Image (cartoon, helix red, strand yellow):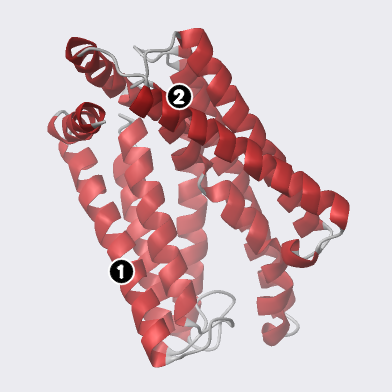
Amino acid sequence: MKTVMRAMGRSLRRSWDEGTRIERAAFVIGVVLFLSGLVHLVVLTISGGPWTGPVSLRKAATFGLSFGLTLATVAWVTHLIQLGGFTVACVVETTLVSTQAWRGVPSHFNFETPFDSAVAGTLAFGGMAIVVLTLGFTLSAFRKVGKNSPSMRLAMRFGFVTLMVALGVGAAMIAVGVTSSQTNPEVAYTTAGFLKPAHAVTMHAILVIPGLAWLLTFTTWPERTRMRVVQLGAGGYLLLSAVVLVEAITKVPPLSAPLAPTLLSLAGLVTLATAGGIAIYGALYRRPAPAEHEELAEHSRSFTDVGA
């Protein structure tokens, strides 16, 4: 087990050592954004502030955690020049949401003052920029082959496509909220919120499924077996996302959904967890020789060759 963990550590270190300046900056900024989310979460817990509503610090915590993870993950799986714009957009979105949270005013759908309008407009523009840049990442993942194995390519393509779905859901939330805010600003915060579960679930496939494929590079299994495990995990994630998306569109809260969709969600979650368990077992308990670990660690660096 220690040998495998060392090989994983070397793989992650290689991602840093062989990364470009913008990639390293993205890693650091991603960590900073993630830590800002944790700080907001701690402050919210200690202060006893509201966990819901447009002025809750929970929103700043969510944006910090989500954008921090997403930025670091995208930097990990790409070598694209557009990463600089993606990094700036993530920083701007998180910073403005956090600023408005500390001011005690809503960040989205808020046009009460010129400053608030400028913030809302900048957030909308930043969201559009992220969509366009992510579309570029997605198209590149389908065009470029590089040194990635078939299971890696499948994982990255699934992750980026699902991330595009998440961004599309986010854009729909903005559109619904802006439309509602023209007649009743207070209603905008509730009408747009029904899509939040779908946005949250689809947001992090880019981390989970490629992470699963990366973990499988430390097994001794043939590529055909690794592909099947990635397909299993992607299938579970797809089922879970589809059910939550349908629930969101039909305005059914996931925690109070009927029995049938609840069972389907659990089936997707269990399938995804099963794929993860298989990968962990393969990495930790199928022990190859040390020389084989060196080869696996070297191979895992090819995970970041999209767009090279």
In space, the residues marked 1 and 2 are separated at their CA atoms by: 31 Å
Q: Considering only order in the chain, which callout, 2 or 1, is on the residue closer to the N terminus?
A: 1
Tell which of 238 and 215 is nearer to you: 215
- Locate residue 301, reporting x and y percent: 26, 23
- On screen, residue 60 versus residue 262, left or right, reads left
Tell which of 200 and 121 is nearer to you: 200
In front: mark 1 or mark 2? 1
Q: Residue at x 44, y 41 (%)?
A: 207
Q: Residue at x 41, y 83 (%)?
A: 44
Q: Which mark is residue 207?
A: none
Tell which of 279 and 50 is nearer to you: 279
Quarter holding the N terminus?
Answer: top left
Looking at the rendered structure, the secondary structure element under dot 1 is helix
Give amino acid for label 1: Ser
Q: Is residue 127 above or below residue 102?
A: above
- Locate residue 237, reporting x and y percent: 62, 39
Looking at the rendered structure, the secondary structure element under dot 2 is helix
